[in-house]
Image: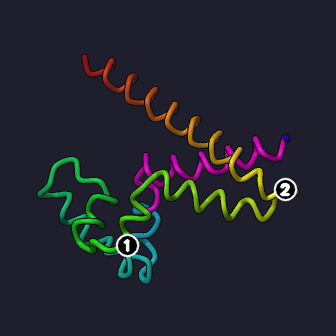
Amino acid sequence: MIDNIIYSFVSVFILIIWFNTEAFVEYAKYIPILRDIFLINKYINSKLTIQNLKYLDFLVMEKNCFFTRLISCPICVNTWTNIFLAFFLTNPLYFFVNFTISTVIYYSITLLNKKIYESSNN
């Protein structure tokens, strides 16, 4: 059962880094192949003209295809992350437990973060 909790937090960590930070962009801009494949320079230039533009929104605007919509969806990313992590569990059916736990934790943190941001701006 402790593995389920650990894997759930791994999923939450991935979701927070991907959806709530600019970490991927910050690191990818220094790696030429990633910078080119993931349109990092174009995104950085677009941010200068479009206020509050998020990287995932930019990707969907630039390359609106199944893959970009998939990686722009927290539920989808969480599903695939938990499918991958299920291979390391003793019982793959724990996927459902991990998915539920990680989804609840991620959205709780996101909601809490939003409330803190709103209260600090008032």
For the stretch drawn in magenta, what is the main secondary structure?
Answer: helix
Nearest to the observer: residue 4 or residue 31? 4
First in residue order: circle 1 vs circle 2:
1
Residue 9 magenta-highlighted: yes
Q: Amino acid at mark 1?
A: Phe
Q: Residue at x 54, y 39 (%)?
A: 106
Q: Secondary structure at mark 2?
A: loop
Q: Residue at x 27, y 71 (%)?
A: 64
97 left or right of 28? right
Q: Quadrant of residue 115?
A: top left
- Residue 65 occupies which quadrant of the picture? bottom left
Mark 2, residue position: 91
Q: Quadrant of the C terminus?
A: top left
As helix, strand or loop, the secondary structure at mark 1 comes to helix
Where are the magenta residues, as a range? Answer: 2-24
Circle 1 crowding by C-alpha within 10 Å: few under 14, some 14–19, many from 20: few
Please name the amino acid that badge 2 sits on.
Asn
Instruction: Name the residue that disc number 1 marks.
Output: 66
Give left or right: position of 54 versus 115. Answer: left
Q: Badge 2: few (under 14), some or many (20 or more) residues near its Cα, within 10 Å? A: few
Q: Is residue 51 magenta?
A: no
Name above or below for residue 41 compared with residue 92.
Answer: below
The N terminus is located in which quarter? top right
Tell me where residue 98 appears, x and y as whole percent: 69, 46
